[in-house]
Image: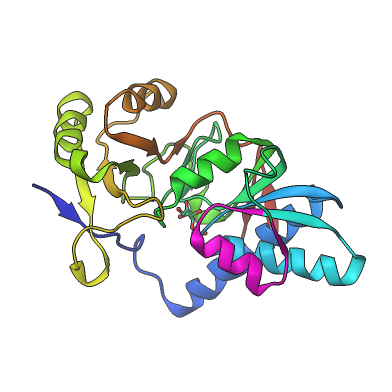
Amino acid sequence: VTFCSIHNVGSTNLRQMDGIEAGKKAAAITAVNNHVKTNQVVGIGSGTTIISAVQRLAERVKEEGLKVICIPTSYQARQLILENKLTLGELEINPELDVAIDGADEIDADLTCIKGGGGCQTQEKIVAANAKEFIVIADSRKDVQVLGTNWKNGIPIEVIPMAWRPVQVQIEKRFGGKACLRMAQRKMGPLVTDNGNFILDWKFDKTDDWWKINTELKLIPGIVETGLFVKMARVAYFGTPEGTVDIR
Ligand code: 5RP
């Protein structure tokens, strides 16, 4: 039985950290400036990059009187919306979104993303799938040709708790690699998602047809959702340590 906890990508010194933060901020601000208009319903992703996007939205509300309804993708996103005094919406009332903005763990040349480093991929995918535009924001380390280049934590797969072991066995038998149960901090049992489920981080050992793999994974009973976002992102904004932004 394999357990695992999430680890950081490589080792980063303080100066690199500043560069990464500058990149995230630049990507977030540019995406909000370019894609959000007044009277829109906006999906708010989860993670650290999205914090700057929410702050920029709040600034635009104050400066220009921008009006937006924000749909959260996690408990964290909900808190962020409330802390920044933005209008909180919900899918029951606003099932169709104009735009969804979110971070990602890695983005390949086709804009296929790995998401769920923070364990929120299920709600993130629901919100993104119901938006006219799904916009990804990230620092430039996450811009890769092939998934798995820098991100070594695998593809997060949300599972119903009682099914985690059989799903682990199935994934490893059918697709290879290792699928390990994500543990909570200080290893106090499995991490529990906002939906009350567990996460298997699937460390794949070969790159493949992600659309096909995602479809096959989704057919395994017990899998709720995967962190593979295939053919979903319309555009990605990558911020560099110098504060410039590459749009792809
Ligand atoms: C959370 C996610 C995040 O968007 C992803 O992990 C990127 O996070 P960060 O912006 O902190 O790098 O998918 O489930």
Residue 242 visible in the shown view: no
Image check: 90 left or right of 155?
right
Q: What residue occupies the far bottom of the structure in this picture?
A: 14
* Colour scheme of the picture: rainbow
Viewer-nearest residue: 74 or 133: 74
Q: Residue at x 56, y 28 (%)?
A: 231
- Whether residue 62 is situated above or below residue 191 in the rendered picture: below
Q: What residue occupies the far left of the structure in this picture?
A: 1
Confirm whether the magenta stretch covers residue 174. Answer: no
Quarter of the figure with residue 128: top right
Q: Position of residue 87 (x, y in %)?
A: 73, 62
- Whether residue 39 is situated above or below residue 25 in the rendered picture: above
Q: Residue at x 68, y 45 (%)?
A: 93
Residue 52 visible in the shown view: yes
Image check: 8 left or right of 188?
right
Question: How many labels, in total?
Answer: 0
Q: Position of residue 236 (x, y in %)?
A: 63, 44
Image check: 240 left or right of 32?
left
- Image: magenta residue range: 71-88
Q: Residue at x 59, y 51 (%)?
A: 102
Image check: 198 left or right of 193?
left
Q: What residue occupies the far right of the structure in this picture?
A: 64
Q: Position of residue 58 (x, y in %)?
A: 76, 68
Q: Position of residue 7 (x, y in %)?
A: 30, 62
Confirm whether the magenta stretch covers residue 85. Answer: yes
Q: Residue at x 29, y 59 (%)?
A: 6
Q: Quadrant of the C terminus?
A: top right
